Image (cartoon, rainbow, N blue to C red):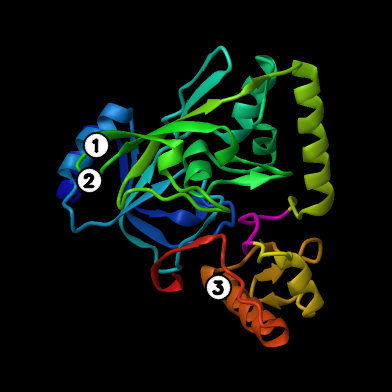
Amino acid sequence: MSELLRTLQDYGTCSEHESLAGHTTLGVGGPARWFFHPDSVESLSAALLLIPVEIPLLPLGRGSNLLPPDTGFPGVVLDLSGLNHIQVNGTTLSAECGVRMSRVTRICADHGLTGLEFMATVPGDIGGGVVMNAGAFGQQVADTLSRIRLMRRDGAMQELQAAQLEMSYRHTSLPYGSLVVSAEFRLAADDGEAVRGRIRDMRTTRGRTQPLELPNCGSVFKNPPGDHAARLIETAGLKGRRIGGASISAKHANFIVNEGSATSGDVLALIRLAQQTVKKQFGVSLEPEVRMLGEEA
């Protein structure tokens, strides 16, 4: 047992050489050197003070937008799923980073609040949603986000207003090395049944058009200005293309699915193939939406 493992176990649950394949929606990835699940925000703050600065950190929610390498992650993976407190005060909703976005939409419907219905179709947590300014169906996090709380590498807390985050399409500017701990949203009052109806419609559309029956990481590429990544990939003739155990979905070309035995290397090879082919045929550079680690980055 390593000294760091013993240290972190005082502040939550910690293991060594934990496979990341079980913690990503794609089902790929090698082992994390340390996998730490803090008991609380306070435990996370105390633990960060004790992790040497030369050891890299990887905050992890559901792992729905993540492609870790087959070689694994050489630092501490911070499993933030336990930070899942949520509170509603009038039309203001506050949620910790580990709250599932699908849970947020249920709470909104119960309280008659609108503005976050799209989160019902995003398989991730609030922390990751803020980091990437997640969005769908014409809505995005930036539309209703009012402020966030961050934790710096030294464990200190910092609050930032949404206007300070320079949010744009699938992008949020955060201080280097900081972790999103919680977020506050200013929503609008609406009829709860109307909110549930919109959520149902979005989920129906998503289920009809996306390959939800197989492990995937959501949209692989950002849509280029004035176009759609899926259209470009399909027109390039890559829909259904397979490498190893991964394939570009025959249902939606901006999805790569794990057909049961995929590796991160297989997924990466398909990403590179799509980028190179689309660039050659259309002169368009596809920018990944999925977060790639290690050499993949």
Name the residue: 36% across, 56% down: 32
Q: Which residues are magenta?
A: 214-222
Work out whether mark 3 precedes mark 1 in sequence or the reverse, and give the earlier one: 1
Q: Is residue 263 above or below residue 118?
A: below
Single out the mark in the foreground, 3 or 1: 3
Residue 263, image quadrant: bottom right
Q: Nearer the viewer, residue 46 or 5?
A: 46
Tell me residue 118's x, y (percent). Answer: 69, 38
Task: Please name the amino acid that badge 3 sits on.
Answer: Leu
Residue 213 visible (yes or no): yes
The span from disc 3 to disc 2 (Cα, nearest Å) is 31 Å
> Which residue, given by chain and number where applicable, does mark 3 sit on?
268
Name the residue: 53% across, 22% down: 93
Q: Give the numbered dot on residue 5.
A: 2
The span from disc 3 to disc 1 (Cα, nearest Å) is 34 Å
Q: Under tag 2, what secondary structure? A: helix
Tell me residue 188's x, y (percent). Answer: 65, 21
Q: Is residue 188 left or right of residue 193?
A: left
Q: Under tag 1, what secondary structure? A: loop
Q: Give the numbered dot on residue 9.
A: 1
Name the residue: 73% across, 18% down: 190
Q: Nearer the viewer, residue 182 or 63?
A: 182
Cβ–Cβ under 8 Å for marks 2 and 1: yes
Q: Residue furthest top?
A: 90
Residue 187, image quadrant: top right
Q: Is residue 221 left or right of residue 264?
A: right
